[in-house]
């Protein structure tokens, strides 16, 4: 075999060997233990802080709201959809029964027109439903700009919750 | 307004109709458009080189070396848009060291290395080895060292050794042609195999990608050859250019027919996605598909090249045409990739809505970043042409 071919094969052999060594050095240590991925990734993800709680934990203290909600259109809506993540609140708010809650435990109380509009604003791509059907899988659509925008006497903008109970609209 | 609500309003203002929440923002941006574009240039340039080497089209000789070095320069950069798109430089390499045959993405490591090392590197090495040995003796300093190192400190340039080089080079090119087809067919396969996306999911995708790759590669080599001759103040070989133009015409025609076939198939089958795609094509993709890709990038070049096949104006006019046409074709193919990659993400899987895409100038996903990955291959090519000038090689007839 000519000398240059031998050297070329040598270079390729060194290259492949170098790659194999590099692969051993660079491969993350728990790779392949549980499958074709880094096993520690599962543990690392489990360390990330949780923010949301289970739906039932709200009703332990707020039974009255649960009853209200179950009688209306919002029966399938989870509390955290409107009030935001509530894990910390559900765990520790009980300790502040007669005291004011610290900011970190206070939940968001949506009350403005824009809050309701997130779901209820007119959207051509959503299926429209009649008001008289009690179909809880579809969302009522309202033109927020024309649907009683303000008090005709005082010209003060109306809030949706002044007429509709948000827990039982 | 609360921050997260403000953000939601902004995001929703980009959306028309109903889209699922995970479809609002495009995950694959301009860098993923570049990836098939650059690999296509590699495959196309290599196939042009193989026309001279395997199919013995001797008239293309002046572009053989340029085509090979162009393919090599772009191949070195082909993975970079992907890696920079991942945005995790500290772990982006892991895809290379943990390949798995069941992952269409991870298999790219194998395809890439095979093509870079076994095909391009070996072909260039065997083609240049004798010249590198000679140039090592003629030059001094760093250049001498580079030639010596690149030729692995070998000195054997006997006719027997050179004949062996030529034979192995030929075998490598023969392996290289199906490899080039596989390389770019694979890139099309990545898109074509995504069943959930009706804009991508077609078995014709690898073939369309392959032919558009050839079109773009040939156009690029044509352009590089003309610019290089201008810089070197050399006369252009008009016969060679006419022949390249002829091949560009044929392959552009096949590419156009294949893409037309794909669209006709879509229109005839008219699956449930058809209305959504129809609106996409005549709405958000109108300019990039019909004007840039269709009219400027395909129809005008086809008509011009077709006319040149039976009416040849003066060389001076042909030169100008050969300067402008590759630019149009390269732009057209870029928009073809754009329409595939970006177009496939603009509509919702609900078929009820569309989102928008706007490229920013700066940032990891901006078009300045994309420009960097398009300019670097030309710098590499300039270096390679300085180091391994094809015009200084000893004439060999690849017979």
Image (tube, coloured by chain):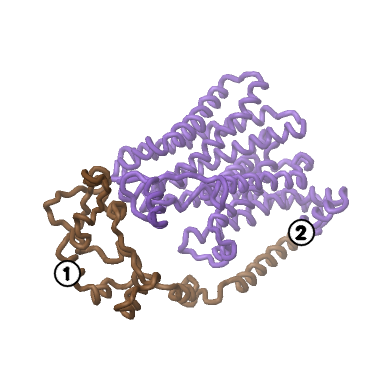
Chain colours: A brown, B purple
Rendered position, B185 above or below A97: above
- Name the chain letter of the residue that bears numbered label 2: A
**Mark 2, residues whose alpha carbon is within 10 Å: few (<14), some, or many (≥20)?**
many
Q: Name the residue rendered at 46%, 51% in the picture.
A: B189
The residue at the far bottom in this view is A95
The reply to whether residue A1 is in sight is yes
Q: Name the residue rendered at 76%, 51% in the picture.
A: B129
Q: Secondary structure at mark 2?
A: helix
> Mark 1 = which residue?
A67
- Name the chain letter of the residue that bears numbered label 1: A
* In the displayed structure image, the side of residue B326 where residue B379 appears, left or right: right
Rendered position, B50 above or below A13: above
Query: How many labels were placed on the picture?
Result: 2
The residue at the far front in this view is A154
Camera-side residue of B146 and B379: B379
* In the displayed structure image, the side of residue B56 where residue B94 appears, left or right: left
Q: Name the residue rendered at 72%, 60% in the picture.
A: A8
Number of the label disc, if any, that sits on residue B239: none
Earlier in the chain: of badge 1 and badge 2, it is 2
Label pair 1/2, CB-CB below 8 angstroms: no
């Amino acid at each position: 075999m000519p000398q240059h071919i031998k050297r070329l094969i040598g270079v390729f052999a060194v290259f492949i060997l170098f790659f194999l060594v590099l692969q051993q050095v660079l491969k993350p240590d728990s790779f392949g233990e549980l499958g074709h991925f880094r096993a520690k990734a599962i543990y690392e993800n489990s360390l990330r802080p949780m923010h949301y709680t289970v739906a039932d934990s709200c009703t332990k203290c707020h039974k009255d709201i649960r009853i209200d909600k179950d009688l209306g259109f919002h029966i399938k809506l989870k509390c955290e959809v409107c009030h935001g993540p509530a894990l910390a609140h559900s765990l520790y708010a009980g300790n502040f029964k007669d005291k004011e809650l610290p900011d970190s435990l206070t939940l968001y109380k949506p009350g403005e027109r824009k809050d309701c509009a997130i779901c209820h604003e007119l959207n051509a791509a959503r299926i429209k439903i009649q008001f008289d059907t009690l179909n809880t899988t579809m969302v009522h659509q309202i033109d927020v700009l024309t649907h009683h925008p303000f008090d005709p006497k005082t010209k003060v903008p109306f809030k949706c919750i002044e007429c509709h109970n948000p827990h039982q609209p | 307004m609360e921050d997260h609500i403000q953000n939601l309003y902004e995001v929703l203002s980009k959306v028309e109709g109903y889209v699922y929440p995970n479809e609002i923002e495009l995950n694959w941006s301009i860098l993923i458009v570049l990836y098939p574009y650059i690999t296509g240039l590699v495959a196309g340039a290599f196939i042009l080189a193989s026309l001279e080497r395997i199919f013995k089209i001797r008239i293309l000789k002046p572009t053989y070396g340029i085509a090979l070095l162009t393919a090599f320069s772009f191949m070195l950069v082909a993975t970079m848009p992907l890696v920079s798109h991942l945005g995790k430089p500290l772990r982006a390499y892991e895809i290379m060291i943990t390949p798995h045959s069941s992952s269409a993405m991870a298999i790219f490591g194998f395809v890439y290395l095979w093509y870079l090392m076994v095909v391009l590197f070996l072909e260039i090495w065997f083609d240049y080895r004798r010249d590198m040995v000679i140039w090592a003796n003629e030059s001094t300093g760093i250049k001498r060292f580079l030639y010596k190192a690149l030729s692995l400190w070998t000195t054997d340039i006997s006719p027997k050794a050179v004949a062996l080089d030529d034979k192995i080079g030929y075998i490598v090119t023969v392996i290289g042609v199906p490899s080039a087809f596989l390389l770019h067919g694979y890139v099309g396969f990545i898109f074509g195999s995504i069943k959930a996306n009706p804009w991508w999911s077609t078995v014709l995708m690898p073939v369309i990608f392959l032919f558009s790759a050839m079109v773009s590669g040939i156009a690029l080599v044509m352009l590089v050859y003309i610019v290089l001759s201008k810089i070197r103040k050399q006369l252009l070989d008009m016969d060679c250019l006419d022949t390249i133009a002829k091949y560009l015409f044929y392959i552009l025609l096949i590419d156009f027919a294949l893409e037309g076939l794909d669209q006709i198939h879509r229109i005839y089958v008219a699956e449930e996605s058809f209305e959504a795609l129809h609106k996409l094509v005549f709405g958000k993709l109108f300019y990039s598909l019909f004007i840039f890709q269709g009219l400027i990038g395909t129809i005008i070049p086809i008509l011009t090249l077709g006319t040149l096949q039976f009416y040849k104006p003066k060389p001076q006019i042909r030169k100008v045409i050969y300067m402008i046409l590759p630019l149009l074709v390269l732009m057209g193919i870029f928009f073809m990739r754009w329409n595939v990659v970006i177009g496939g993400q603009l509509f919702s899987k609900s078929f009820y809505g569309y989102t928008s895409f706007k490229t920013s100038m700066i940032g990891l996903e901006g078009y300045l970043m994309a420009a960097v990955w398009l300019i670097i291959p030309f710098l590499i090519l300039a270096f390679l042409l300085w180091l391994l000038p094809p015009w200084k090689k000893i004439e060999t007839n690849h017979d």
